[in-house]
């Protein structure tokens, strides 16, 4: 337990460090949200200065950081200049959509990767293994963007699926089953892209981990005891080879908020990706900081969960 | 004396008989079609007498472990036959093979790697018992504890994991797991080589006791001829995948016929004289 408490303290310190760096880097970046207003002849420089003062942008960096920390404590996470509302509400709304997409993609990728990795490892060198490895090499080499454009091209040409967005027009009037079907159709392209992007890495990790364990003498001993192939793979080899996979699973969880930004922007999915792009272009400072901090929280939580899982499932880690 | 008894027993039909056994490994380059063929075992014929300890000796990479894995039915030979208790077993599959497996057990050199690190000592012993339906429910734990006691381990350690045991204790645990299935033939693949001399002697004594109580036949794979001199009834010498000499311990070790056996024995003598020189130097 002390180990996990120590890791949580490390996580909190990391959050503070990231927040300080965020403020430093955004301060170093040229310009701010109100600079574009200066180009508008209908807005006087006094008005712009008043707005800068209203949002505290004319104050020194430590003061701004202190006010932001106060805002975080109040649960607002800063204030969006563009949306004129607290950042938390904005991020929460978009994060729900992003998590639906990435959660589903991560779940599907793992559900495919574990059995596929175990199966190919148990048939190392056979032609199905070679076909699978060639496939994973191909998808590792192809950028995510090419995959999503390829899928969108197919969808647009075939009219089989909606080409973008999250819901169809008139969604509110649909019945429950229709709503689910409509959402599922919109999910296919972005989810498939994310699955194809993460699957090769996962399959290769599961395979490599299993190959190492399957060559251990205790596996030969288990075969010698007449234990069936399936039981050896899933009761003997997989739990022993699971440690690197648990760490990888932690990384998957860590990337839930930030792993789909590009795909969301391309497919018009109303998640955090488009929000981050808009906020970065318009220099909506606190939205960008809020998104970076949310991703950091997920990163820390993912790694912490992976460590907790390792401690829970592997007696050797507990002993150490 | 032990060899004389063994020779008498050898008059009985062999427990294991191997004829013309060959095993090749083919390696392919990652980006080429070139094949590298390794002849691990070549046209081996041998017999292993019941309730005897047969030592299989030879230098590293001579094919001893491959032959052992073929005999343990963990590898399928490319050619040849393996007869066990009068039945040809090398091509068996499925249920036939599953029913045969408990009778032939193997103890590995790497005791840490040979035991599932996620299982407790009791689970390690109980798993094969459960699979082969030799015990169930509460009986599993009870039987596992009995077997631990039989090999000289305290049942209080039943819930400990393998990495909490010493090397010698892990080897005892591996022996307990092997005898749980009441095998007839136990293959010891360099099982004593990583142990210190005192632990080696203790394990050898345990194996000798178990041979008496369980009527076991041993195949000891080893390159320590000093050890072989003490414990073996019969000796097989392997070189480049072939058995180059065979016979009783006395015949092979006292009057070796093959040049490789003589070479192995002379290297032991060289080592012994080197030790004597070191000891006499330290004493003076």
Image (cartoon, coloured by chain):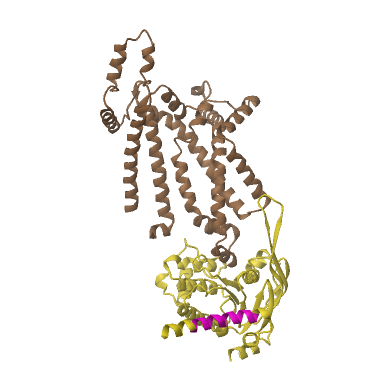
**Does residue A63 lie above or below A209 as drawn?**
above
* Image position of B44 (left or right of A97): right
Main secondary structure type of the part rendered in magenta: helix
Locate residue A150 relative to residue B125 in the image: left or right: right
**Residue occupying the point 57% across, 35% down:** A143
Q: Quadrant of residue B6?
A: bottom right
Q: Is residue B236 above or below residue A197?
A: below
Q: Which residues are magenta?
A: B261-276
Q: Position of residue B190 (x, y in %)?
A: 56, 73
Chain B: its colour in the image is yellow
Which residue occupies the foreground of this view, B12 or A21? A21
Q: Is residue A89 above or below residue A5?
A: above
Could one spot residue B54 in this view of the protein?
A: no
Q: Is residue A47 visible in this depiction of the protein?
A: yes
Among the chains pictured, the one given brown colouring is A
Quarter that holds the N terminus of chain B: bottom right
């Amino acid at each position: 337990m002390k180990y996990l408490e120590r890791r949580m303290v490390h996580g909190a310190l990391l959050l503070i460090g990231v927040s300080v760096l965020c403020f430093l880097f955004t301060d170093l970046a040229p310009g701010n949200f109100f600079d574009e207003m200066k180009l508008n002849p209908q807005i006087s420089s006094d008005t712009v200065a008043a707005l800068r003062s209203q949002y505290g942008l004319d104050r020194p960096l430590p003061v701004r950081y202190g006010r932001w920390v106060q805002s975080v404590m109040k649960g607002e996470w800063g204030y969006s200049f563009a949306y004129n509302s607290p950042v938390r509400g904005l991020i929460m709304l978009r994060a729900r959509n992003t998590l639906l997409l990435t959660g589903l993609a991560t779940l599907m990728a793992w559900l495919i990767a574990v059995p596929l990795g175990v199966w190919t490892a148990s048939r190392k060198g056979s032609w199905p293994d070679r076909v699978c490895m060639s496939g994973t090499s191909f998808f590792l080499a192809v950028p995510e963007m090419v995959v999503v454009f390829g899928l969108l091209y197919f969808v647009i040409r075939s009219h089989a699926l909606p080409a973008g967005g999250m819901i169809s027009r008139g969604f509110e009037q649909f019945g429950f089953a229709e709503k689910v079907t409509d959402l599922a159709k919109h999910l296919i392209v972005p989810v498939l892209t994310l699955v194809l992007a993460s699957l090769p890495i996962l399959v290769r990790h599961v395979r490599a981990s299993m190959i190492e364990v399957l060559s251990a003498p205790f596996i030969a001993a288990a075969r010698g005891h007449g234990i069936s192939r399936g039981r050896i793979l899933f009761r003997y080899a997989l739990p022993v080879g699971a440690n690197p996979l648990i760490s990888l699973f932690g990384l998957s969880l860590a990337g839930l908020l930030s792993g789909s930004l590009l795909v969301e922007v391309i497919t018009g999915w109303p998640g955090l990706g488009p929000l981050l792009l808009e906020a970065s272009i318009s220099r909506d400072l606190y939205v960008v900081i809020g998104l970076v901090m949310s991703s950091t929280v997920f990163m820390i939580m993912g790694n912490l969960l992976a460590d907790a899982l390792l401690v829970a499932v592997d007696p050797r880690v507990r002993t150490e | 004396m032990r060899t004389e008894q063994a020779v008498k027993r050898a008059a009985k039909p062999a427990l294991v008989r191997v004829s013309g056994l060959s095993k090749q490994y083919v390696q392919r380059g990652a980006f080429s079609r070139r094949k590298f063929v390794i002849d691990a075992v070549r046209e081996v014929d041998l017999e292993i007498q019941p309730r005897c300890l047969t030592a299989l000796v030879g230098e590293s990479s001579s094919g001893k472990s491959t032959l052992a894995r073929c005999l343990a039915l963990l590898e399928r030979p490319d050619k040849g036959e393996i007869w066990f208790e009068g039945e040809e077993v090398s091509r068996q599959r499925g249920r036939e093979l599953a029913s045969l497996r408990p009778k032939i057990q193997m103890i590995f050199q790497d005791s840490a790697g040979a035991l599932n690190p996620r299982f407790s000592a009791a689970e390690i012993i109980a798993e094969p018992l459960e699979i082969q339906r030799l015990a169930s429910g509460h009986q599993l734990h009870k039987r596992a504890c009995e077997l631990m006691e039989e090999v000289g381990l305290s049942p209080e350690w039943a819930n400990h994991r393998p990495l909490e045991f010493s090397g010698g204790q892990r080897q005892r645990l591996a022996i307990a797991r092997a005898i749980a299935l009441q095998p007839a033939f136990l293959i010891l693949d360099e099982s004593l080589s990583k142990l210190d001399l005192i632990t080696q002697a203790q394990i050898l004594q345990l194996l000798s006791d178990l041979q008496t109580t369980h009527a076991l036949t041993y195949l000891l794979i080893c390159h320590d001829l000093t050890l072989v001199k003490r414990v073996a009834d019969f000796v097989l010498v392997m070189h480049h995948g072939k058995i180059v000499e065979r016979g009783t311990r006395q015949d092979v070790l006292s009057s070796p016929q093959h040049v490789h056996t003589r070479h192995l024995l002379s290297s032991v003598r060289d080592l012994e004289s080197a030790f004597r020189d070191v000891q006499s130097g330290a004493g003076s």
